[in-house]
Structure formats: C-alpha cells, structure tokens
Amino acid sequence: MRPAGIIAFMISPASRRAAGSLFGLAYGDALGKPTEFLTVAEIDRRFGPTGPRELVGDPALVTDDTQMALAVGWALHDAPTYTPGAVEPLLRRRFLDWATSPDNNRAPGMTCLRACAELSRGLPWQQATEAGSKGCGANMRVTPVGLLDVDLDTLAGLAQLQAGLTHGHPTGLAASELTAYAVRLLVDGAALADLPDLLTARVDEQRRVYRADWLGDLWKRSGVRAPEEFISRGWQECERALARLDVALAAPDDGGDPCRLTGEGWIAEEALAAALYCAIRHADSPVYALVRGARTAGDSDSIAALAGAFVGAAHGMSGWPSGWAERIEYADQLAALAAAPD
C-alpha cells in the first residue's frame, strides 16, 4: 500500500476532486448507515426532521459500500494494465478478502456474499455471478473507476466487469457504467445539473454495445438470442430510471423522501437516480445532499454514498467539513487512493 497522510492528496485540482469523491462516498455511507431499514418517520423521531447531519463516532463507521469501493480501488491501483486479464484476478482476490474479513460485519448484501462464495471455488466469474441480480451492490462500489484517467471504452469495460463479478444482470452493468461515467464527467468539470442529459445521451450511444472482451459469454446465461439483446435490456431500464429522474427534477421540491419519486434504491438504476436527485437538488450544499439521501425509506447508505461521490467530485474536499477527514473510518486508505497516480 502506498503510504499517504490525510493531506497528501492536496496536490492538484484533479486529485482534490478525486479525494472529494472518495471521502464523500464514505461520508454519505456513514450518515446513511444508522437510517437504513428505517421509515422516514422513524428517522425523524431519532434524528429530528432535518435528518442526520454529523458523523458519529471516532472513527465514524461505514458499511460494506465503502469497504467494497476500497476493494475496487485497490484492485485498480495494483493492476499493471487496465485489461480484463489483468484486472479480473485482482478484483476477485480483493472481493474474496473482503468476504472473509472480520470487518465484513456491516449487513453485507447477500448477492455479493453468494457470488463471492462461488468465486472462491475458482469458477469463471461468468458462472459465479448472480446472473439475475441488479442490486445496487453493482454500482455502490464503482466510483474508483470513474476517477481513472482512461479512455471511455476502458472506463466502461472496467465498470461493467467489476459489477459483473457479483451482479450479472444487464441493468447492473449499465447502471455501473453510468455511475462511473457521471463521476468522470464531474471530475472533468461538468455541472451536476447537466448530468441527466449527458447520461441519457450515453444510453443512446451504448444501448446495443456488448463488450465481449470484458464480459465474455455472460449474455448466454440470460437465455436471450444475442448479446445485443441482453445488454439493451439494461440500458432500457436505466433510460426509464433517468426519465423518472427528469420528471422528479421538473417538479417543485417538497423536501420529502426522494425515493417516492425515483424508487427506493435497492436496485442499481434506482440507486443511481435517487443519488442524482439528491446531488442535483443540493448541488451547492454537499452535506445536505448526503442528509437528503440518508433521510429516505430506501437503501439510505447506498443512496447517500453515491450522492456523496457525485457532489464530492463536483466540489472536491472543500465541500466537506474540515474535521471529517480525520474521523471517517478508512481515512488513510481513502487518502492514499486519492493521491495515487493512475
């Protein structure tokens, strides 16, 4: 592991945005951790009507969302090249290390655990994956891919591969690519408000692109006639989620649970849409974007984590309270990955 202090990432605008995104993911995860599985009424009784606004604990604990994002980040860090043959074994090893870690005690997703059990048997990942799952575990961890300085085809392949090891549904693949692409756009300077149109354009470009060099014969597990038919289902579902997001953003904001408008976020395309809603509605208030994600009846830690990755990529570390970086769990790893060269 490359040693780095908490301030080591303060070296360039791109690294500041990378740090803001990675730390934002962890901050949102920590704020959403205690509200997952609660109704909004229960959250309000426990935290008040403004939701959780402060990190609790020293360190403030995160969930499997951040743990698995770190697993992806370190696999990419260790890869000699960004090719399927180089990256897949590293992802597999990091996922299996996570699955057996004593720190994997944060209500991990069953899809990831089942797929890791199959990966541990040495099966090809296309056989080990949960082919019918499009849970948000596919894209809750993809942020490190979006922070790489790689061409868009490589970004897409990496995003889909890391998703596919556990979540083999085409919507999990497409939503992961869109999530990584959104992070890339923000690091490059795009405005949060422009993301829905930019992501919809990406759907139009990619809807029949099956990346066989990255995915192999995964498509055959779905029972469809052709790989293009397989992947197009994922893009169609993401397109519908983005259309619901557009409708939600066009209406006045009543301050309520965004999951009523975008879906509860347990599945990949809904987690993306809900997180984008929170980030765009509160583009100038990064902490409140996290709070909005945490104050939901849906998958609050994943929604808040992705919202944090988005607003953090837009604002960099300046968007976050100054004392949080020293208190969040895994701060040393987050800082080291943000500072590491591509």
Image (cartoon, grey):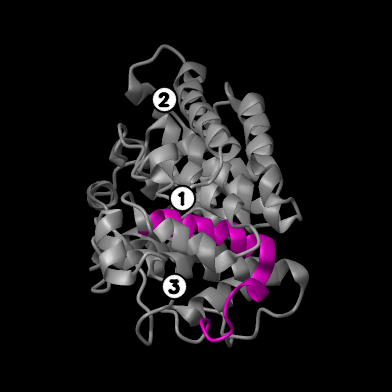
Numbered tag placed on residue 51 in the rendering: none
Q: Which residues are magenta?
A: 301-325
Is residue 246 shown above or below 47? above
Q: Could you tell me residue 315's position as x and y percent? A: 68, 66
Q: Which amino acid type is shown beneath numbered disc 3? A: Arg
Q: Nearer the viewer, residue 90 or 148?
A: 148
Q: Nearer the viewer, residue 279 or 138?
A: 279
Q: Could you tell me residue 145's position as x and y percent? A: 57, 54
State left or right for residue 38 relative to residue 86.
left
Camera-near label (2 vs 3) is 3
**Label 1 CA crowd tier, 10 Å (few <14, some 14–19, many 20+):** many
Report, in whole angstroms, how far the alpha carbon at label 2 lies from the one at label 1: 18 Å
- Would residue 185 be counted in the magenta stretch? no
Is residue 137 shown above or below 187? above
Camera-near label (2 vs 1) is 2
Lower position in the chain sequence, tag 2 or tag 3? 3
Label 3: which secondary element: loop
Name the residue: 57% across, 80% down.
Answer: 321
Q: Which amino acid type is shown beneath numbered disc 1? A: Glu
Q: Which residue is mark 3?
A: 53
Report, in whole angstroms, how far the alpha carbon at label 3 lies from the one at label 1: 38 Å
Q: Which residue is mark 1?
A: 88
Q: Which residue is mark 2?
A: 219
